[in-house]
Image (cartoon, rainbow, N blue to C red):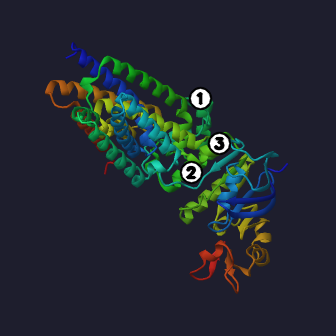
Amino acid sequence: MSVLRLKGVTLRLGGRTVLRDLDLAVGQGVFVGVLGGNGAGKTTLMRAILGLLRPSTGRIEVFGRPAGRGNRAIGYMPQARANLGDLRLSGRAFITAASGGVGWGLPLASAAQRADVERVIALVDAGAYAGRPVGALSGGERQRLMLAQALLGQPRLLLLDEPLAGLDPHHQAATIRLVRRLQQSLGISVLFSAHDLNPLLGALDAVLYLGGGHAALGSVDEVVTGPVLSRLYGSPVEVVRAQGRVFVVAGGQQPAGPAAGANERDRRVHV
Amino acid sequence: MFTYDFMQNAFAAAAIVALACGAVGYFLVLRQQSFAGHALGHVGFAGATGAVLVGVSPFWGLMGATVAGGALMGALGEKLAERDVAVGMVLAVALGFGVLFLNFFTSGAGQANALLFGNVLGVDAATLWRMAACCGLCLVALALIARPLLFATLGPDLAEAQGADVRLLSILFLALAGVAVAEAVQVVGVLLVFTLMVGPAAAAQRLCTRVGTGLSLSIGLAGCQALAGVALAYLTDWPSSFWISALSGLGYLGAVVASAPRA
């Protein structure tokens, strides 16, 4: 059974078509990198899978059922928000706030919920700082807490929106190693969005490349190639591999879509 | 001082208000909407003076305006209450209308003073019962929405994905904040709503890393400051609003010093 299946899905946001006529399926226990520049539709796609955005055409199935809000089989880590800097609540209290779901009543955690909180804190190795105020933690530590929130309730599909944003290369590598380890040990599927492919090389089972309103899903070697990306963007794109890294180079013309905005400096873009 | 009826009423009013403001204020500060709470007081000023003008009790004019104003702020968008320019404009326009209504209502200087700076020593038994009922309603409603509200405050995107109606929560909460603000106005007045709504809650949040303890400390601080303020006002014959605001400021200062990272 597919974890996630999209059939003829078109997603519009504020009158603009972000993604057009997507057909794809993601199986069980795979680590998928969702790649594409700013505005390529990475967040929009995740919101649609969560049921927060209804496709204007087509259908999205998650574990064989239509996508809808409040699906506890999905864990979600939104893009990091900046307003936690003043928060004096502990990391544990921050995670616990998300543990009881959204039912009415007092925010009192049951024994099972408290145990789940301790489980996810251990999973993301946050035990050493879970008792400290969130505002006193580093950006990397706060992202661990948000990853822990996403793991509450034992989801079978994780949607991680730009978990590498704002991290230095060392912390990026550590985050990728952690997510890969969790994905394999828990046997779950992960959609991991990023705008740079290179830190993720070697960890991914598949890449879902979004660009020019279209998507291509497959292994890195299948998808991140000149012909595939040229077709995606509708203009010539070359892929250069050097020293274990991958670079997408705009061809004769600027590629339409998000990569164009990112390569003004030297016409060379990290995928 | 405990033998006088007006003092008993004043202590009871202070305790009721502190309970509502300490609890609601905790979430208000956590949601970074304290300025919105401040503005609600001013909306209430226009409501109260407008009500007097058309012959309605100022208490219900105040309450109606703050609750409607809060619900509207929540409905206009979860982020609006954090936009200080928009909130500041609402505050200024509301105060302007209040002045206009007051102008039509010629004998209102004493009433205006009570609205702006509070008059806890003038709370009568009927008002006290109304305040107790509103406080009870406010706390019950807050208890009902507390879990999703806390979740939506700390992780709005995640809460939304799990099925929380973040906008509805925002409307409900700011309407509740309107009730608490209208209560606070009875004790400290429109201009000093911050002292009971924000001061104790902000101090508690600096000191506590858990929601339960923070909420309890917020209510406790608000209670101590309000009651001590009334007692000091009796002993010194200075305005109780001054004492409550001074104690609130001291409490916050103390919390900032106590929670400052040590070098």
Q: Name the residue that disc number 1 marks.
A: A110
For label 3, count other residues whose C-alpha is less than 10 Å away and answer few (under 14), some (14-19) or many (20+).
Answer: many
Residue farthest to the right, as pictured: A1
For label 2, count other residues whose C-alpha is less than 10 Å away and answer few (under 14), some (14-19) or many (20+).
Answer: many
Of marks 1 and 2, the one in the foreground: 1
Residue B5 placement, left or right of B51: left
Vertical arrangement, residue A42 with respect to residue A114, above or below:
below
Quadrant in the picture for residue A180? bottom right
Q: Name the residue that disc number 3 marks.
A: B162
Vertical arrangement, residue A77 with respect to residue B152, above or below:
below
Q: Name the residue that disc number 2 marks.
A: A144
Residue farthest to the top, as pictured: B3
Measuring from the top left, give residue A75's x and y in whole percent.
67, 46
Dot 2 falls on a residue whose secondary structure is helix
* Dot 1 amino acid type: Ser
Of marks 3 and 2, the one in the foreground: 3
Q: Is residue A124 visible?
A: no
Gap in Å between the C-alphas at discs 3 and 1?
19 Å
B182 and A173: which is toward the camera: B182
Gap in Å between the C-alphas at discs 3 and 2?
20 Å
B186 and A196: which is toward the camera: B186
Measuring from the top left, give residue A184's x and y in whole percent.
73, 51
Q: Are marks 1 and 2 on the same chain?
A: yes
Vertical arrangement, residue A257 with respect to residue A236, above or below:
above
Q: Chain of mark 2?
A: A
Name the residue at 49% across, 37% down: B173
Q: Are marks 3 and 2 on the same chain?
A: no
Residue B239 placement, left or right of A9: left
Dot 3 falls on a residue whose secondary structure is loop
Residue A154 placement, left or right of B122: right
